[in-house]
C-alpha cells in the first residue's frame, strides 16, 4: 500500500466530511462500508477500492482528483522523487530508504550521500 497516497486520501476525505457537517458514521453508512473501515481510511491506514472511492466522491461531493491529491500541479522535482521512490519493482528496503531520506534538507542529504559513498568504497575493498 502506498502510505503517502493513503494519508492524502484520508486527509482530503476528513476535510470534505467536516465541511459537509457529517460524522464518520454518516459517511460510512452512505458509502456502504463499516464505520471502522472508514475511520481507518481517514487515518491513512487503508486505501479505498475504486468502487468505494467513487461512492466516497459522490457522498462527500468532492472530485476524485482532489481526493487523490492530483488537483494541483505537482512540482517536477516532487513528481520525479515520487516516481523514483514508489517503483513497485524496487525492493522494499530501497523504498524504505528513499522514504527515510525524502524529508531531509539539502545539507543532510549531502552528508548522507558522503556516508553512503564511504560505505560503498569500504565494501569494494
Image: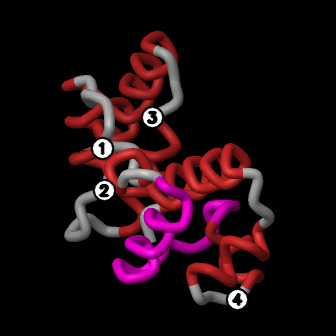
Q: Position of residue 12 (x, y in %)?
A: 55, 48
| Few, some or many residues within 10 Å of mark 1 (<14, 14–19, 20+) | some
Q: CA distance from mark 1 to mark 3?
A: 9 Å
From the image, tell me which residue sits under label 3: 102
Q: CA distance from mark 2 to mark 1?
A: 6 Å
> Which residue lies at the image location 50% right of the left edge and 69% below the top edge?
56
Q: Position of residue 122 (x, y in %)?
A: 35, 40
Closest to the camera, between mark 1 and mark 3, is: 1
Q: Secondary structure at mark 1?
A: helix
Q: Which residues are magenta?
A: 42-61
Chain-order first, disc 4 or disc 3: 4
Chain-order first, disc 4 or disc 1: 4
Q: Secondary structure at mark 3?
A: loop
Q: Are the residues flagged by discs 2 and 1 in contact, CB closer than 8 Å? A: yes
Q: Are the residues flagged by discs 4 and 1 in contact, CB closer than 8 Å? A: no
Q: Position of residue 29 (x, y in %)?
A: 68, 83
Q: Are the residues flagged by discs 2 and 3 in contact, CB closer than 8 Å? A: no
In the rendering, which numbered label is found on residue 86?
A: 2
From the image, tell me which residue sits under label 1: 82
Measured along the vertical axis of the image, is residue 66 above or below residue 91? above
Is 56 part of what is drawn in magenta?
A: yes
| Few, some or many residues within 10 Å of mark 4 (<14, 14–19, 20+) | few
Measured along the vertical axis of the image, is residue 68 above or below residue 2? above
Is 104 part of what is drawn in magenta?
A: no
Q: Secondary structure at mark 4?
A: loop
Is residue 92 rendered to the left or right of residue 30?
left
From the image, tell me which residue sits under label 4: 34
Amino acid at each position: 500500500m502506498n502510505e503517502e497516497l493513503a494519508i492524502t486520501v484520508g486527509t482530503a476525505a476528513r476535510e470534505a466530511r467536516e465541511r459537509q457537517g457529517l460524522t464518520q458514521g454518516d459517511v460510512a453508512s452512505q458509502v456502504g462500508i463499516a464505520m471502522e473501515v472508514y475511520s481507518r481510511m481517514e487515518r491513512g491506514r487503508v486505501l479505498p477500492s475504486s468502487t468505494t472511492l467513487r461512492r466516497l466522491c459522490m457522498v462527500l461531493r468532492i472530485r476524485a482528483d482532489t481526493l487523490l491529491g492530483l488537483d494541483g500541479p505537482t512540482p517536477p522535482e516532487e513528481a520525479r522523487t515520487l516516481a523514483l521512490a514508489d517503483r513497485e519493482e524496487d525492493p522494499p528496503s530501497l523504498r524504505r530508504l528513499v522514504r527515510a531520506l525524502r524529508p531531509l534538507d539539502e545539507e543532510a542529504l549531502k552528508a548522507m550521500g558522503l556516508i553512503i559513498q564511504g560505505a560503498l568504497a569500504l565494501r569494494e575493498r
